Amino acid sequence: MPSVHAMSGSRTMPAPKPATPPMTDPTRAPATRTAQPAGPGSSIRAMIRHVLRWLAAAGAFVVSLDSTVNVAFPAMAAAFHAPADSMRWVIIGYVLTYALLSFAGGAAGDALGHARVFRAGVAASAAGYLACGLAPTLGWLVAGRVVQGVGGGLIYGTSPALVTLGVDADRRGRALGFLAAAIGTAFAAGPLLAGVLVERFGWTAVFHVRLPLALALLAGSVALPRAPAKARGSRVWAREVRRPAVLRLGALAFAGNAGIFAIWLLAPFYLVERRGADAVTAGALFMLTPLGTAVAAPLAGRLADRLGARAPMAAGLALEAAGLGALSRAEAGTPAAVVALALLAAGFGLGVFQVPNMTALMACFAAGQQGAGGGFAFLARTLGTVAGVAVLAEVFARARPVVGFDAAFSTAFTLAAGAVALAAVAAALGGGAGAARAGG
């Protein structure tokens, strides 16, 4: 502790503490470091935390293999004799559910233990994969997707807290970059895997392939020794979520994900119907978007730790908008290299944005509320996904009968690019002042 010398005598007196703690910038992780315990007990705790991080990343990886489903949309629509725009319910039934459950699951993890809630999510996901793979009608498929969404929400809601457990605050971006890389890798591998599965086994295989993965993950998480007890997290009140810093960061996440789902919803139909690509080729091109996100995530984590969140967020959103804008001009005869570059750029931009955004959001919540902080980040992302799917699908569906596929596709992507561009401007202009901690 710092000390000051008295005017008379050699006695030292403790220096007075400041009356008011300094405010923390929510776009920059605090630089304080946690104490490092010593001894054999601490080694066991560190090992358990390390395994938990890998299990959390593996769980998010399995959930994120849902990117296989998008490539299967044309086959699903044909099997159920449903129009292309009806596939929005396959997305919304799943995504809206896990959007709501991600925040609730993260908050429940703060109170009950993140590992326990994570295991429940893995079990629910396995049940959802089985139900979707056996669905006889589109309605049953959507119902199975809701069950799947419950599991996905609990996994996504707890995984950020698990991967940052015991991590120094100034290295949190790297830990979240590790999680984002796992998610992005699954998103990238999914379309290519789906192309092979749909060609050889049909659309149901995109669900069946994840069932054994989920069961293996569940067995591993159950066999893991109980994590060290921790202090119960504090309850998250509505006023803490309504703070301007939290809402601003959440709004940016909303816009970034709403825009990118123009690709997830409409690009498969463009690649298959307009370019005449088979499922494997379409999957290979489609995977460039999530591949860009996966490649960008570790870099974005380091940038967030070193520079703060503001500049990477703005740059990432600007690059995403540029990629979406380029895709708005794509037609049947557009060179494949141009389409590939636009898909990659949009995904890379999203990856540069997402990790700093989640890092800043989690810094807005107290240490005992990290589950709620990570869950809120996923809530904002997925509400954006739902809104993007609903709005862009409606725009496309209304325009296509009137102006044709190419013009309707262009309209939807122009709208998406404009929304993300506005978010980039807001990220660049947004202030970093304000308390980061709950109640600050």
Image (tube, rainbow, N blue to C red):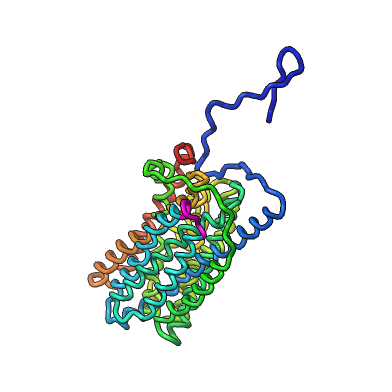
**Front one among 158 and 378:** 158
| Left or right, residue 37 beside residue 349 | right
Q: Judge whether residue 379 is colored magenta.
A: no
Q: Position of residue 309 (x, y in %)?
A: 52, 47
> Residue 36, image x and y in percent?
67, 47
Say which quadrant the N terminus sits in: top right
Let me know if residue 374 appears in the view: no
Q: Which residues are magenta?
A: 109-115
Compare residues 358 and 213 and report the one nearer the observer: 213
Residue 110 forms part of the magenta stretch: yes
307 versus 72 height, above or below: above
Q: Is residue 124 left or right of residue 298?
A: left
Q: Quadrant of residue 154?
A: bottom left
Q: Quadrant of residue 409?
A: bottom left
Residue 60 seen by the camera: yes
Query: Could you say where residue 370 lies in the image, as x and y percent from the top left?
Result: 50, 50
Residue found 34% across the figure and 64% down from its top? 389
